[in-house]
Amino acid sequence: MTKPRANLIIINAREVLTCVPIDHDLVGWKKDAAIAIGGEKILAVGPLDEINKQVETDSAEVLDVTGKIIVPGFVDCHTHLVFGGSRSQEYAARMTMTAEKVKELGIPTGIIATMQMTRSATPEELTVSASDRLNRMFFSGTTTVESKSGYGLSLKEEIKQLEVNRRLRLVQPADVVSTFLGAHDFPPEISREKYVDLVVNEMIPKVAKEKLAEFNDVYCDKGYYSVEQSHRILEAGQKVGLKPKIHVDAYADIGGAEMAVKLGVVSADHLNYTPRKMMAKLAKAGVIGVVMPGIDFAVGHKKPFNARAMIEEGMTLALATDLCPGCWLESMQLVMQLACRVYQFSPAEAVYAATMGGAKALGLEADRGSLEPGKLADIQIWDLPTFEAVIYRLGHNAVDTVIKRGKVHNP
């Protein structure tokens, strides 16, 4: 039987975190393991002498990573990557002022402020700014990024954002997974009822027909979309093949999580006000909980999410940046640092949530999120003495090399 041929082999790693759990070892820690890659896929992971028995490596390029650590690429499963302008003035003012005082000073705030800036930006301008952010994310170890619309809030402008996602796939190596979030807020120019009708009857059919998104999301919370409106929007997406996701319980428990369970959403994101009994229901339904320490930090959230309770109730958690104008955070490493220091994640739990957890939140666990034969060779290499140091060296970018679909990229 002919052995598969490797074109790249990674050797001499200090540690390999496969993120394939072994008994109580969540990250599947291996020592003295090599990785053989053929084309875009991983062929084998294990001791070099065993790999040589399974794979033809004679003509393979050798990447010697002596003393370094091999980890799956991060899967950032909740971002608002594409947006116009900046809200730095608002962010800075909120350090010392109330929201009311900021508005009195005439400083543009919130989603509607970003909507206006995004509408005024050309597709080319949005592509350039988003590509710049995505490039920094990539060289911080993120190889797959979910990118939501939601700052257009009209048919034309939402489509513009989603088309930028498509452009980004052509100019950046990271995979961009597109999510339609027309139900992010309500535009000021029409009534809420008419806007919901627009989302359901025009936007969702257009997005599905042009294959501009894989997911349909809604902001179900106090002051935003009601449970009934959210159900209508998510169900409309399901009917045309858009998988449901939900922003829920960020600022109040209005019953959105219960509805999400019944509807069978892929992930429920934020979860600050989610009752413990509801966590158990989400776990039983297989809904991935996406938690984002960065946004809690950026807004000074009064009720941080309870990650330990979610884990104890059996939920699978994913970590994400929630990169957006109100939380300009590009580093999943910093997200893990916050998760461990503030939310009582262990380093292993944080690594798993940032890789395999993120893949599960996007329904992509079959081909990424872990290092095992047959999966994409989406890999990051850390220049650290131990993997725990990634959450110890605050603000430090541990990434030495990124491999995306088998291709080596150096900063």
Image (cartoon, grey):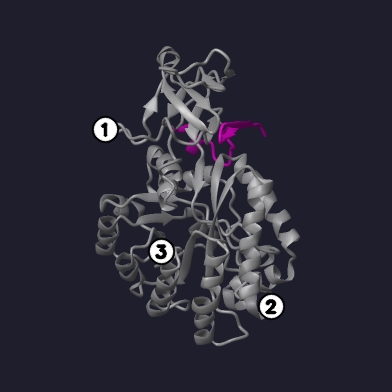
Disc 3 and disc 1: Cα gap in Å? 34 Å
Q: Is residue 269 left or right of residue 109?
A: left
| Camera-side residue of 56 and 42 | 56
Q: Amino acid at mark 3?
A: Lys
247, above or below 22, in the image: below
- In the picture as drawn, the residue positioned furthest to the front comes out as 1
Give, as a three-letter code, the residue at label 2.
Answer: Leu
The vertical placement of 66 against 69, above or below, is above
The answer to whether residue 93 is left or right of residue 371 is: right
Residue located beneath label 3 in the image: 303
Residue 124 within the magenta-colored segment of the rendering: no
Do the residues under discs 3 and 1 have CB atoms within 8 angstroms? Answer: no
> Which one is in front in this view, the residue at disc 1 or the one at disc 2?
1
Give residue 23's mark: 1
State the SS at label 2: loop
User: Number of callouts in the render?
Assistant: 3
| Residue placed under numbered mark 2 in the picture | 105
